[in-house]
Amino acid sequence: MRVAVTGATGRMGREVIDAAREAGHEPLPVSHSATGETGGTEVHPADGFATLLSEREPDATIDFTLPDPSVSYVADCAEAGVPAVVGTTGFSEAQLAALREAAERIPVLQAANFARGVQGLLAVVREAVAALPEYDVEVTETHHNGKRDAPSGTANRVLDAIDQTRGDSSRVHGREGEAPREDGEIGVHARRAGDITGEHEVLLAGNHEELRLTHRAGSRGVFAAGAVEAAEWLAGRPPGWYDFSDTLPDTES
Ligand SMILES: NC(=O)c1ccc[n+]([C@@H]2O[C@H](COP(=O)([O-])OP(=O)(O)OC[C@H]3O[C@@H](n4cnc5c(N)ncnc54)[C@H](OP(=O)(O)O)[C@@H]3O)[C@@H](O)[C@H]2O)c1
């Protein structure tokens, strides 16, 4: 498979290029800032992305960049009929709507987290919240000091999973000053430090007991390998909006 990889010099872009090669695919790195080559492969300029798509006809694009460039890259994919795997997080509603519009023309798979264990976490959180309706819930995520958006896209997915089970809750982002806990609220905490790849913890507490459900990603390679697997799954599918859970057996989104 030939895979265009946008954000080629980014933390995730570099991992995706390696993961694509390891899986036996040909990566086409695309960068808005770098020229030259990476690991013996030519880096293509972002402003020539549309031309690259039409001339090299990749089977899919994998994007880990920023919301604005991501929307623009996916629009080019829609024009060229190239499936898009989007790992970027932090989209506004309007940006998500633009991605969904592209999904009317091409298959688009957007996921805040390409680690399989997070799909397991989501499933277990739904069950735990359903089994313990009176317990207080707090969600804490921890990432490296270079992460821009907060809370993480994965934390938002966890919160959506809780809402699906409990009904809409009020989310309280951090607490400061006089801030007593209200019934039913969910505290959301984002920590940024060092080079931590990604950690999510859901705490349920009540009845003099605590249940802590935690996922830790050991390396960015986990996300990159998942994104490459998603691209393999997506190539050749009909246009539509897909989730990473769609690619895995026996999980629901
Ligand atoms: N879904 C998941 O599993 C998962 C896992 C980890 C991270 N993420 C998300 O993936 C995204 C990237 O994370 P990261 O840690 O790789 O960030 P990063 O190291 O900052 O890389 C982002 C890359 O985006 C490109 N970029 C920046 N500004 C741009 C612009 N104006 N136009 C076009 N490209 C631009 C740059 O690459 P070039 O200069 O080479 O174009 C930059 O290196 C974030 O949203 C993060 O939350 C998702």
Image (spheres, helix red, strand yellow):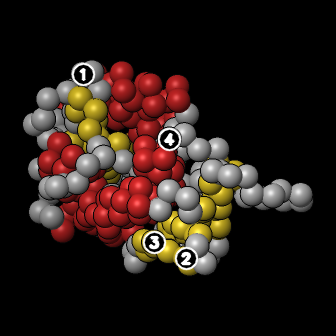
Q: Secondary structure at mark 4?
A: loop
Question: Which residue carries the number 1 mark?
Answer: 105
Label 4 vs 2, first from the N-terminus: 4
Q: Secondary structure at mark 2?
A: strand
Three-letter residue code for mark 2: Glu
What distance separates the C-alpha of mark 1 from that of mark 3?
38 Å
Give the total of numbered labels: 4
Question: Which residue carries the number 2 mark?
Answer: 210
The percent coordinates of residue 179 (x first, y second) are 83, 56
The percent coordinates of residue 146 (x first, y second) are 60, 63
Q: Which mark is residue 167?
A: 4
Q: Secondary structure at mark 3?
A: strand
Does the numbered disc 1 mark a residue whose Cβ is under 8 Å from ligand 1?
A: no
Label 4 vs 1, first from the N-terminus: 1
Q: Residues within 10 Å of mark 3 (few under 14, many from 20)?
A: some
What distance separates the C-alpha of mark 4 from that of mark 1?
33 Å
Question: Which residue carries the number 3 mark?
Answer: 213
Three-letter residue code for mark 1: Arg
The percent coordinates of residue 4 (x first, y second) are 27, 46
Q: Is residue 30 visible?
A: no
Label 2 vs 1, first from the N-terminus: 1
Label 1 vs 3, first from the N-terminus: 1
Q: Residues within 10 Å of mark 1 (few under 14, many from 20)?
A: some
Label 3 vs 4, first from the N-terminus: 4
Can you tell which of label 1 and label 3 is closer to the viewer?
3
